[in-house]
Amino acid sequence: MDSLDKTFVKALFSSVYYRGYKEIEIYVLNTLLHIFQTMKINDYLHQDFRTVDEIIGRFGLHEQSGPFLQWAFDYTAYLGYLERNNDAYQLINPITAINREENLPQILQFIPSADIFINLIRIIETGIKDFLEGWVKGGDLLFGDATIVNLWNSNFNNDFYGYAVVNHGIAYGITKWFSQTNGSSMLEVGSRTSGASAMTFQLLRDNNLLDSLHTIVLTDMVPTLLEKGRSNIKLQVTDPPLYEQRILDINSPIDGQGFSGETFDIIFGVNVLHVARDLSFTLQELRSHLNKDGMLILAETTRPAANRPMHHEFIFNLLENYHDVKLDPEMRPQHGFLTREQWLKNFHKAGFRNIEYLSELDHYDNISFDLKPLHSFLVLKGQK
Ligand SMILES: C[S@@+](CC[C@H](N)C(=O)[O-])C[C@H]1O[C@@H](n2cnc3c(N)ncnc32)[C@H](O)[C@@H]1O
C-alpha cells in the first residue's frame, strides 16, 4: 500500500465510528416508533396487517406521506419491530414507553459530531405531523427557517465525520486516477458548500497536481450554497486554485445552461447522481462532456443490499426529488441510494471503459472491524 492509500484508509475506517452508526440506527428506529405512537397509528398497526394506503386512508394523511411511510415501515420491519406480509405490515409489539435518550450518550461518545444529525432529526420530528397531513411540503420542513438551514450547513460539512468520509473518498479517487487523464480541466456537479471540492483541492495540492488544472468549474443548482462554498474553500485549502462557479442542473442537457460544448478531463460529484431523475440520461450527458480519456468519478453512499432501508432516508424521503425518479427493474429498481452492483451496471451501460472502484466494503480487512456494515460508500471511476 503506498502512502496515498495509507492516508485514505486511516482517514476513513474506524470501528468506533460504526458503533456510533449502530446507535444512530436505534435512535432513528425509536423516533419512528414514537411518531407512530403520537400519530396514533400504533394500535391500528398492531391489530392486523395494514398497507401504506390503508394507513393513509384511515388517518386522513396526504399522499405526499407515502414514500416516507413506506420507508418507515420497511426500516422498522428490517430492524425487527414490524412484520411484513407482501405490501402489508403489522406491529409486533405495541411499544408504549420509548426512551430515546438512553442511546444518545453512546452515540455522542462514539461520534461526538453526530449531535448535528440528531438535532436535525429532532427538528424534523416536530413538523412531521404537518408533513404527513399535507400542511407543509418536505422542502419547507427541511429548509424553512434559519435554524434548520444552519444545521444543514453544519451537517454537510467536513467537520462532521459522518459526512466527511465520502469527501475523503472522492479526493482520494481523483488524486489516485489523475494521471490517467490529461489533468487540465475539471467540472464538479452538485458542489453544495464545496466540502468535496475543498478536500480534493487540498489532496491534489499535497500531491503537486493542483497547478496542472487550468480550468475548474464548480456547479450546483442553488446559488447561496455555492457562495458558502467560496468561503469554505478559502478556509480549508492552502493556496486555493482559480475556479469559477456556475448553475447546472444534472436533469437537463448541459449545453444551454451556460455551457456550449465544453469538455473536461475530470467530472466528479459526491452523493448527487442518486437523485438524477433519469440516471441513464445524466450519465450519458456527463460522458458526452468528457475529453477522450477523461473520467467521471463519483463518490456515493451505497446500500449493502437493494432491499436495505437506511437511516439517512428519514430525511431524504421527505423530498420529492429523492423519490421521484425513473425506475428500471434492472438498472434502478428502487429510488434513493443504489448498491455497488447497480452503479457498476449503470456505468457499463453508459459506455464507460476502464471502470475501477474503491469500495469501503473491500477494506474491512484493514481495520479491526467486528460489526456488520450498516451503510457504505463507493468511489467509482469510468473513462471515456
Ligand atoms: C449531498 S450534496 C453534495 C455535497 C457536496 N459534495 C459537499 O461536500 O458539500 C448534493 C448536492 O446536489 C445538488 N443537487 C440536487 N439535485 C441536483 C440537480 N438536479 N442538479 C444539480 N445539483 C443537484 C444539491 O443542491 C446539493 O447541493
Image (cartoon, rainbow, N blue to C red):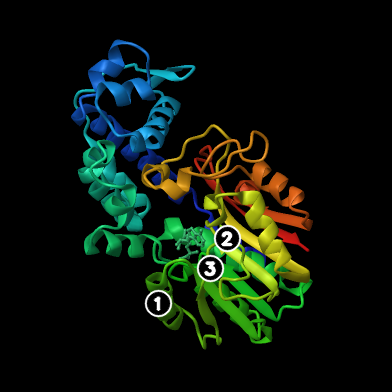
| Disc 2 residue crowd, few under 14, some 14–19, many 20+, Cα 10 Å | some
Amino acid at circle 3: Leu
CA–CA distance between discs 3 and 1? 15 Å
Residue 324 in the image: state x and y as whole percent: 48, 44
Residue 41 in the image: state x and y as whole percent: 25, 23
Residue 382 in the image: state x and y as whole percent: 73, 59
Determine which residue is flagged by label 1. 227
Q: Residue at x 40, y 70 (%)?
A: 225
Give the position of the C terminus as an image quadrant: bottom right
Q: Residue at x 23, y 43 (%)?
A: 135
**For the residues bearing labels 3 and 1, Cβ distance under 8 angstroms:** no
Determine which residue is flagged by label 3. 248
Residue 125 in the image: state x and y as whole percent: 24, 43
Left or right of 20? Residue 148 is: left
Q: Is residue 19 visible?
A: yes
CA–CA distance between discs 3 and 2? 8 Å
Which badge, 3 or 1, comes first in the chain's sequence?
1
Query: 182 or 114: which is nearer to us?
Result: 182
Determine which residue is flagged by label 2. 252
| Disc 3 residue crowd, few under 14, some 14–19, many 20+, Cα 10 Å | many
Label 3 CB, ligand 1: below 8 Å? yes
223 over 319 or under it: above or below: below
Q: Is residue 3 visible?
A: no
Amino acid at circle 2: Ser
Depth check, mark 2 against mark 1: the one in front is 2
Amino acid at circle 1: Glu
90 over 226 or under it: above or below: above
Q: Residue at x 61, y 67 (%)?
A: 254
**For the residues bearing labels 3 and 2, Cβ distance under 8 angstroms:** no
- How many numbered tags mark residues here? 3
Q: Residue at x 30, y 47 (%)?
A: 137
270 over 199 or under it: above or below: above
